Image: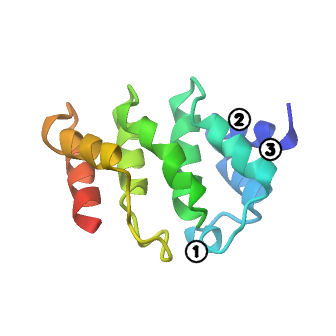
Amino acid sequence: MTREQELVRCFGTKGREIEALEGLAGGASATWLRTVTLTEAAFEALVEGLTDPNPRIRWWCIQVLDHVPDPRAIGCLSYLLDDPVPRVRRNAAHALGCVACKPDWDGDLPGDVVSTLARLAVADSSDKVRKEAAVALNRR
């Protein structure tokens, strides 16, 4: 296991989030993250973490990829719109619509992602997911 993968695993333990953020990105604030260029190893570990069985790890990986201005992150987040955990789906919807976190992003999403957000906005079992999906669609 690489150091970056170990740091991503830290997201699964409450109280170790700052350690993981500082190790992966060199800082922990949202403002800091928006200025960071992740190493390839850190980016790959975060993308790998999106499929971790622990929803807390998936949620934190989305959180980091939402704030880091790497256009590759958008494509990696879309399948989490169908995550079994509502909190993870909501965070993925937010990340796919948050232009504030990615000021250089044009907001463009593939058609299938837009369709999934539209479906979630009207039919998700979670009120919070429905609201976040609707917001994501309106921010485009």
Q: How far apart are marks 1 and 2 (CA)?
A: 23 Å
Amino acid type indicated by mark 3: Glu
Quarter of the image for the C terminus: give it.
Answer: bottom left
Crowd around label 2: few <14 · some 14–19 · many ≥20 (10 Å): many
Amino acid type indicated by mark 1: Thr
Crowd around label 3: few <14 · some 14–19 · many ≥20 (10 Å): many
Of the two numbered discs 1 and 2 on the same chain, state the one appearing first in sequence. 2
Q: Distance between the residues labelled 3 and 2?
A: 9 Å
The residue pinned by badge 2 equals 9
| Residue 9 coordinates in the image, percent (x, y) | 71, 35
Q: Is residue 127 visible?
A: no
Q: Residue furthest front?
A: 111
The residue pinned by badge 3 equals 4
> At x 13% / y 41%, what residue is drawn?
122
Quarter of the image for the N terminus: give it.
Answer: top right
| Residue 76 coordinates in the image, percent (x, y) | 54, 44
Amino acid type indicated by mark 2: Arg
Q: Which of marks 1 and 3 is in front?
A: 3
Label pair 1/2, CB-CB below 8 angstroms: no
The residue pinned by badge 1 equals 31
Of the two numbered discs 3 and 2 on the same chain, state the one appearing first in sequence. 3
